[in-house]
Image (cartoon, rainbow, N blue to C red):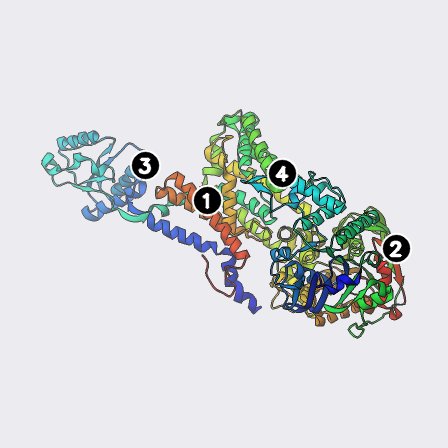
């Protein structure tokens, strides 16, 4: 149908207009955090070694000056590998203080060795011991100090930072899948923050007491986590029953569950952080597969599944119908109660999974986890374009919303915005998202109606 | 009534009131006169224009033409405040009371007697008590209105109107939810009010009541002023004739098909006060008309058959098989479907596309293991778009942007796809323009030819008589009559069974 292709673009703008906001934000923070970057570690070592080979040829004699850190060790190894590979010699390697460098220079001078280059990184290049070398050590001959070339690049776009943002998103984004479903049915779930804590605590206690503590095997850990998620799913189901059978407003029903779940987490853990978990427990939260964090892989997979469920299955259609008009849905034969029960159970289970990810990131279970997370999750859903009135919303919109929230938080940290002001900004963003929703509803903005692309 | 009051300027005089809404000419030059101390009954079928006229008087609508005079002085009533100032008080069927507030608080809501921001409760209580004394009925003034009986709440409304110095009080179907004893009581109150010089406009479908309380009666039909008569000069036959007017039968393309044996058999259906022991059957190929006034239990009966409400008692059989219907899902599974009266709030998910709406009850069949076959969904819907001539630009069109006729067709399409055997239409042509109405009638005929059992609930008597093979009339939750010889029946016959 031609109408369909004609409106595809405008529908994309209407449904996922927030993607432009996200791009704008990324662009803004890329410019705002643009800074001089000094390569360190292996990258820095490679860079400086290449510079040395380029200026002095393969046979240079090199002194490596580095501090006693893990990162600098990589720096040293990289230089050694390249210089020796090119046929040069490493006259001496300094790993420590400027005084160590002076001793090394003394030794070289005393031994009458030739020295061409001192390879430094950004930190060691500032050691004053390397100033006026020709005057201090005439015996060494003409020695140059090489430092890896610096370049300008946004702090925001550094690989480490992007991975950091991705890890921050995972917990919120995973729970936001469940929250999106709940909000599409025109409900709300305030208990997810507490369920994070409960899940983390239950999983950690089970690993400690039943799976063998720090020596626990993978299978036992998976079972412990599954049990913790099941507990959260049950609490979600309880919210669902309260909402459907007893017709308690979701706000109140889940507020009660929020208190109960939090109380349980504190009770079970006796208020303590539980750390008796094996090193391998961090696989989900901090591990990666081919450079991509495992949590991010799981999140993407869950979103793919959730998107398909919402757009291509009976269940998804029912969720939208219940939120759009519960009475019409009931009179059309939709099992309204079962649908509601499902979404609250699912939201609880996903909050439980979020708790496992957080526990894995911190390698512990703590009742203080997840505090106020429900607000970030709800904000992600609302910013992602899901209407609090129900019946409308897109799973991928929520993912974008989660990214927007995380990017803003991260960007504000990088640009050193006062934490108190950060709260104000996030509140204002949430307010703006809700106002846009209201505006759409009242037809103030005709987003993409006639192919107009007033996306922001 | 003495002639003396009639010679003075009337208390209220509405002349040539005209009001159009987009697509509907609701009132055409309507007159209404009320003298001090008299009760004027306003009569007419559903949709005759009574509510519109009352809303104009209350300031909820502004007329396109016409004048309103109170005591001979022309009034411009543009909003409810103007109406209050002019001395008009309207008591709607749905009361405007805040259930959590007491009678006293409700009466003075928005006009609290206060000094320096503090409410003077004692003064309010004194005035409230005085009002109830004036009405002649004591009502507890410090109990939340939600806990008062309906009759007591009505009195609170009257007291509130009086506290606003209302001299013209409009009562919209005041007796609809009262017991016979309470109605007698209400009449005492009305007589008390008229004795104090207040004019009352009384709207009711119950001709018996009008006989005993009204002094004069004004009749509207299809937005037109039919006439005003003194109640003593007119008999009931003439009144009914004024209300229903002449038959317009060419609008209805009734096609009678061979009627077979019983398909749907309903026995002893009950639910509270709304439906009291309703039994009937619908035969193969038959269109059964179910009529009665609003609130007579027609819609409630349909909802019980469909499982939308829980029934207290009764059985439902289809083709001699007992159906266990507890919720709409059960009814749908057995091939029983309901096209609700209120399409917007019950028939459609307005924010979704017409195709999604069409698919909603059919998803179990359009999907394999929960996986929707989008192509099949599109094709099935296209089939109905063509066969029912649904006018939509594309299948993604949102349901809320369709005309009433097309909305009704979408609802019909979703049930036809579901192979419905019993189709209950509740007000199938309400809010639908003439052309689309005719098409709906043709579809009803076609379904009857296919052997479906059809129940058509309607308030429009010409439609009921024009389209049904047999008509049942309901009144206060019971079936009060059956008309088998529909071709020779008149609207008066139906009305006689419906009003009692």
Q: Residue at x 16, y 38 (%)?
A: A115
In this rendering, which labeled residue sits more in front, label 1 or label 3?
Answer: 1
- Res A400 visible: no
Chain at tag 4: B
In this rendering, which labeled residue sits more in front, label 4 or label 2?
Answer: 4
Taking the image as shown, residue A195 lies to the left or right of residue B191, namely: left
Observer-nearest of B303 and A385:
B303
1 and 2 marks in contact (CB < 8 Å): no
In the rendered image, which residue does mark 4 sit on?
B121
Spatial CA span between label 1 and label 4: 43 Å
In the rendered image, which residue does mark 3 sit on?
A71
Q: x and y percent of residue A136 in the render?
A: 11, 34
Q: Secondary structure at mark 4?
A: helix
Q: In the rendered structure, which disc, 1 or 3, sits on the residue that comes first in sequence? A: 3
Q: Secondary structure at mark 2?
A: loop
Spatial CA span between label 2 and label 3: 85 Å
In the rendered image, which residue does mark 2 sit on?
B320
Taking the image as shown, residue B438 lies to the left or right of residue B122, namely: right
Q: x and y percent of residue A244 in the render?
A: 67, 43
Position above or below: A154 against B213:
above
In the rendered image, which residue does mark 1 sit on?
A427
Spatial CA span between label 4 and label 2: 66 Å
Chain at tag 2: B
In this rendering, which labeled residue sits more in front, label 3 or label 4?
Answer: 4
Spatial CA span between label 1 and label 3: 39 Å
Chain at tag 3: A
Occupied quadrant, residue B8: bottom right
What is the number of the mark on residue A287? none
- Res A258 visible: yes
Q: x and y percent of residue B347 in the render?
A: 69, 57
Q: x and y percent of residue A55 in the render?
A: 19, 48
In this rendering, which labeled residue sits more in front, label 2 or label 3?
Answer: 2
């Amino acid at each position: 149908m031609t109408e369909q292709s004609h409106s595809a673009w405008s529908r994309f703008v209407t449904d996922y207009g927030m993607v432009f906001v996200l791009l704008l934000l990324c662009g803004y923070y890329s410019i705002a955090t643009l800074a001089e970057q000094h390569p360190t570690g292996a990258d820095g070592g490679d860079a400086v070694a290449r510079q040395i080979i380029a200026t002095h040829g393969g046979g240079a004699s090199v002194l490596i000056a580095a501090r006693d850190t893990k990162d600098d060790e990589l720096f040293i190894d990289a230089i050694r590998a390249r210089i020796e590979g090119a046929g040069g010699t490493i006259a001496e390697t300094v790993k420590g203080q400027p005084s160590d460098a002076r001793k090394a220079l003394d030794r070289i001078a005393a031994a009458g060795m030739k020295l061409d280059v001192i390879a430094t990184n950004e930190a060691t290049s500032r050691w004053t011991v390397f100033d006026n070398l020709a005057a201090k050590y005439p015996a060494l001959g003409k020695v140059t100090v090489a430092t890896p070339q610096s370049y300008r690049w946004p702090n925001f776009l550094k690989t480490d930072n992007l991975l950091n943002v991705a890890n921050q998103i995972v917990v919120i984004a995973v729970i936001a899948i469940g929250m999106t479903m709940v909000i599409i049915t025109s409900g709300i779930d305030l208990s997810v923050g507490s369920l994070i804590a409960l899940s983390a605590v239950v999983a950690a206690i089970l690993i400690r007491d039943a799976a063998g503590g720090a020596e626990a095997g993978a299978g036992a850990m998976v079972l412990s986590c599954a049990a913790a998620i099941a507990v959260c799913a049950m609490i979600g189901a309880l919210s669902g029953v309260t909402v459907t059978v007893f017709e308690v407003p979701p706000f109140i029903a889940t507020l009660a569950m929020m208190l109960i779940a939090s109380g349980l987490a504190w009770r079970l853990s006796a208020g303590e952080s539980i750390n008796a978990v094996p090193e391998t427990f961090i696989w989900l939260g901090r591990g990666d597969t081919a450079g991509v964090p495992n949590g991010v892989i799981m999140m993407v997979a869950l979103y793919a599944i959730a998107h398909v469920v919402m757009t291509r299955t009976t269940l998804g259609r029912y969720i939208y119908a219940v939120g759009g008009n519960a009475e019409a849905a009931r009179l059309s034969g939709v099992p309204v109660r079962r649908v509601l029960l499902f979404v609250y159970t699912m939201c609880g289970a996903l909050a439980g999974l979020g708790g496992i990810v957080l526990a894995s990131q911190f390698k512990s279970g703590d009742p203080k986890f997840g505090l106020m997370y429900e607000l970030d999750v709800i904000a992600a859903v609302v910013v992602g374009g899901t209407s609090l009135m129900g019946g409308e919303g897109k799973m991928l919109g929520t993912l974008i919303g989660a990214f927007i929230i995380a990017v803003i938080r991260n960007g504000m940290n990088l640009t050193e915005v006062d934490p108190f002001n950060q709260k104000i900004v996030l509140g204002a963003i949430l307010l703006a998202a809700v106002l846009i929703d209201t505006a759409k509803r009242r037809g103030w903005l005709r987003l993409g109606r006639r192919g107009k692309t007033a996306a922001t | 009534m003495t002639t003396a009051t009639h010679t003075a300027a009337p208390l209220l005089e509405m002349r040539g009131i005209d009001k159009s809404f987009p697509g509907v000419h609701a009132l055409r030059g309507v007159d209404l006169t009320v003298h001090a101390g008299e009760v004027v009954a306003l009569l007419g079928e559903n949709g005759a224009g009574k509510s519109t006229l009352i809303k104009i008087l209350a300031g909820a609508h502004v007329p396109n033409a016409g004048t309103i005079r109170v005591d001979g002085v022309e009034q411009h009533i543009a909003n409810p405040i103007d109406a209050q100032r002019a001395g008009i008080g309207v008591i709607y069927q749905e009361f405007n009371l805040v259930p959590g507030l007491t009678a006293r608080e409700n009466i003075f809501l928005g006009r609290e007697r206060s000094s320096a921001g503090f409410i003077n409760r004692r003064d309010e209580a004194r005035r409230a008590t005085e009002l109830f004394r004036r009405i002649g009925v004591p009502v507890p003034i410090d109990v939340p209105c939600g806990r008062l009986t309906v009759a007591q709440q009505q009195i609170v409304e009257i007291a509130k109107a009086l506290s606003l110095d209302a001299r013209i009080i409009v009562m919209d179907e005041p007796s609809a939810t009262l017991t016979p004893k309470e109605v007698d009581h209400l009449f005492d109150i009305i007589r008390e009010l008229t004795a104090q010089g207040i004019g009352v406009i009384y709207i009711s479908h119950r001709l018996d009541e009008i006989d005993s309380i009204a002094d004069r009666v004004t009749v509207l039909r299809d937005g037109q002023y039919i006439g005003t008569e003194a109640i003593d000069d007119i008999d009931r036959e003439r009144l009914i004739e004024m209300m229903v007017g002449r038959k317009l039968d060419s609008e209805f393309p009734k096609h009678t098909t061979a009627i077979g044996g019983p398909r749907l058999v309903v026995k002893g259906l009950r639910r509270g006060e709304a439906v009291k022991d309703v039994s009937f059957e619908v035969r193969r190929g038959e269109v059964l008309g179910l009529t009665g006034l609003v609130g007579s239990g027609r819609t409630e009966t349909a909802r019980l058959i469909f499982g939308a409400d829980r029934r207290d008692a009764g059985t439902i059989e289809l083709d001699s098989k007992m159906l266990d219907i507890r919720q709409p899902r059960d009814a749908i599974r057995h091939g029983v479907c309901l096209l609700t009266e209120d399409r917007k709030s019950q028939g459609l998910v307005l924010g979704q596309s017409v195709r999604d709406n069409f698919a909603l009850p059919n998803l179990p069949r359009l999907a394999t293991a929960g996986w929707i076959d989008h192509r099949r969904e599109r094709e099935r819907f296209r089939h109905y778009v063509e066969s029912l001539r649904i006018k939509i630009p594309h299948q993604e069109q949102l349901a809320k942007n369709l005309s009433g006729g097309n909305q009704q067709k979408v609802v019909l399409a979703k049930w036809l796809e579901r192979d419905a055997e019993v189709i209950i239409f509740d007000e199938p042509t309400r809010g639908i323009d003439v052309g689309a109405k005719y098409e709906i009638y043709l579809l009803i005929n076609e379904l009857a030819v296919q052997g479906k059992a059809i129940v058509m609930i309607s308030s429009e008597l010409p439609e009921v008589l024009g389209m049904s093979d047999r008509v049942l009339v309901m009144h206060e939750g019971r079936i009060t009559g059956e008309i088998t010889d529909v071709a020779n029946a008149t609207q008066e016959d139906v009305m006689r069974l419906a009003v009692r």
